[in-house]
Amino acid sequence: MDYSQMLEQLRSGELDKFVVTSKEFSDFYVVWRDYPYQNAIRGTAERGGIITYTAKDDEAS
C-alpha cells in the first residue's frame, strides 16, 4: 500500500477514511512518523489492533 498517497488523499478529502490493521501498522508507521501534516489526521483505535484514520474536522479544532 502507498500510505503516503492515502494520507494525502485523506487530507485533501478524496478519501473519507482508511483502516490500518496491527499487521500493517509497522509499515504504515514508517510513513506516518515523517508525514508533515499529522495534525490534520485523526486515528481512532478499535479492538483487535485496528486503527481508523480520518481527516480532522476543522470546525472542531
Image (tube, helix red, strand yellow):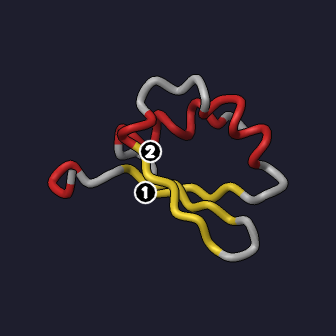
Question: Farthest residue toward the bottom?
Answer: 47
Q: Nearer the viewer, residue 8 or 31?
A: 31
Residue 8 drawn above or below residue 53: above
Q: How many marks?
A: 2
Distance between mark 1 and mark 2 Cα atoms: 6 Å
Do tag 1 and tag 2 residues touch (Cβ < 8 Å)?
yes
Choose top left, top right, bottom left or bottom right for residue 26. top right
Please rate how many residues cluster around mark 1, counting C-alpha atoms within 10 Å: few if below 14, some from 14 to 19, many from 20.
few
**Residue 1 horizontal side relative to residue 42, left or right:** right
Residue 19 drawn above or below residue 37: below
**Residue appearing at x 46%, y 39% in the figure:** 9
Amino acid type, callout 2 = Leu
Q: Nearer the viewer, residue 16 or 41?
A: 41
**Residue 52 horizontal side relative to residue 56, left or right:** right
Q: Nearer the viewer, residue 5 or 31?
A: 31
Give the residue at mark 2: 10
**Residue 53 horizontal side relative to residue 1, left or right:** left
Amino acid type, callout 1 = Asp
| Quadrant for the N terminus in the image | top right
Determine whether the residue tagged by mark 1 lies in a helix, strand or loop. Answer: loop
Give the residue at mark 1: 16
Q: Nearer the viewer, residue 32 or 19?
A: 32
- Residue 55, image x and y in percent? 38, 50
**Residue appearing at x 45%, y 36% in the figure:** 38
- Residue 35, image x and y in percent? 53, 27
Label located before the other in sequence (1 or 2): 2
**Residue appearing at x 21%, y 48% in the figure:** 58
Residue 5 drawn above or below residue 49: above
Determine whether the residue tagged by mark 2 lies in a helix, strand or loop. Answer: helix
- Residue 15, image x and y in percent? 45, 50
- Residue 6, image x and y in percent? 56, 40
Please rate how many residues cluster around mark 2, counting C-alpha atoms within 10 Å: few if below 14, some from 14 to 19, many from 20.
many
